[in-house]
Structures are given as structure tokens and as C-alpha cells.
Amino acid sequence: MKRALLVIDVQNEYFFGKLPVSHPPGSLGNILRVMDVAAAQQIPVVVIQNTSLAANSPVFRKGSPEWELHPEVARRHREVLIEKNWPDSFAETTLAEWLKGNGIDTLTVCGYMTQMCCDTTARRAYHLGYGVEFLSDATGTLAFKNEAGSVTAEELHRAILVTQCRFSKVLKTDEWVGQLSGE
């Protein structure tokens, strides 16, 4: 098994912008921890950065302070930074090419948001034949309300983790770290 850690959209928008992640508590700390463990274990770290296609977008506008990577993620080791415009980190990016070129067969997913880019990328990875690990406490989301109804951040996160079991091995950070020491 040769894995890579995907750190998806850990950008200021989710901390200081219009989309503040609220659940689960401590998700950023867990993301930083798995980045550090991956670097120490020589697991390639792939950082994904979302960019809105609309020049006047209220979120993820390229060059805005909210678009920037969270400073703690930006200062950590990574093999590659891939910019994306869609929830699927593979769509119209160099991710698949980079993974193939590096012989990766297993992806560990962390980042934001659980139900959007993390879920979409994990499902696509599964369909492309990758083994997928989904870190339940190193992903996160916020409450949503629209014309269809409302859902708390906790309910939304849990529902995605339950359905993600079809596509991924859902793990907590401690389990993932412990698994690495047993390999």
C-alpha cells in the first residue's frame, strides 16, 4: 500500500470568512496532527485549494484573505499544492496524474467540508479504484438551512460518515495514527 494524505480546502474562509466550520470541535488540530504524522512517516501530503470561478464570488475569491490556506497548513510540509474549482478534487486538476506518477493507491481524506468536497472527492477516488480512508474527526462542517429545510452541523457530519462507509474506511485520527505504526 502506498498512500497519500489529501488536505482538502483548509482555507481561511472556514475560520474567518462566511463559512465558519463548527463541528466536530478540534478538527483543525487533527488535520495539523495528521499532516505532521504524514510528513514524519514520509507519506506524501497533497494540499488542495478551492478557488471560485466567479471573479466577484463572495467566497473563495482568488487572492482574497479568505481564499488563502490556513496559516498553519500553509507553513507545513507538502509535496504539491493543487488548485481546484469544483467539489471533486479530481475534476479538471492534475491530481490523478500526480497520484499515478507517484504510485499512490490509497488516499487519506481530511479537510473541509465533510459533505461537499471531502465526500465528493472520496467517492470519486473510490470509483477510480483507490483505497480511501476518511478521517471523521479531521473533517468538518457547519449547520445549513435552505428551502429544503435545515440540518445541524453534527447531524450533517454524522450522516455523511454513515454513508461514506460504502466508499471509505472511516477512521478517527488516533486510529489512523495507530494503524500507521502497525504497518
Image (cartoon, grey):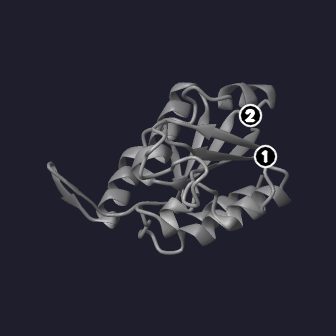
* Residue 4 position within the rendered picture, expressed as x and y whole percent measured from the top left: 72, 43
Please, is residue 154 above or below residue 82 in the view?
below
Q: Please report the residue visible at 81 percent of the width from the left and 31 percent of the height from the top.
A: 102
* Residue 127 position within the rendered picture, expressed as x and y whole percent measured from the top left: 51, 26
Please, is residue 14 above or below residue 125 in the view?
below
Query: What residue is disc 1 on?
Result: 44
Which residue is outermost to the bottom?
A: 25
Looking at the image, which is closer to me, 177 or 90? Answer: 90
Query: What residue is disc 2 on?
Result: 104
Q: Classify the position of the N terminus by image quarter.
A: top right
Report whether 150 appears left or right of 107: left
The reply to whether residue 33 is visible in this rendering is no
Local SS, label 2: loop
- What's the residue type where badge 1 is placed? Pro
3D distance between C-alphas at marks 1 and 2: 9 Å
Where residue 93 sits, quadrant-wise, is top right
Local SS, label 1: loop
Report whether 115 appears left or right of 100: left
The reply to whether residue 87 is visible in this rendering is yes
Looking at the image, which is closer to me, 181 or 63? Answer: 63
Quick one: label 1, few (<14), some, or many (20+) residues within 10 Å?
Answer: many
Q: Please report the residue visible at 85 percent of the width from the left and 51 percent of the height from the top.
A: 42
Q: Please report the residue visible at 37 percent of the width from the left and 63 percent of the height from the top.
A: 142
Q: Nearer the viewer, mark 1 or mark 2?
A: 1
Which residue is outermost to the front?
A: 56
Mark 2 or mark 1, which is nearer the start of the sequence?
1
- What's the residue type where badge 2 is placed? Ile
Quick one: label 2, few (<14), some, or many (20+) residues within 10 Å?
Answer: some
Asked if marks 1 and 2 touch (Cβ < 8 Å), the reply is yes
Please, is residue 44 above or below residue 137 in the view?
above
* Residue 35 position within the rendered picture, expressed as x and y whole percent measured from the top left: 72, 59
* Residue 109 position within the rendered picture, expressed as x and y whole percent measured from the top left: 58, 48
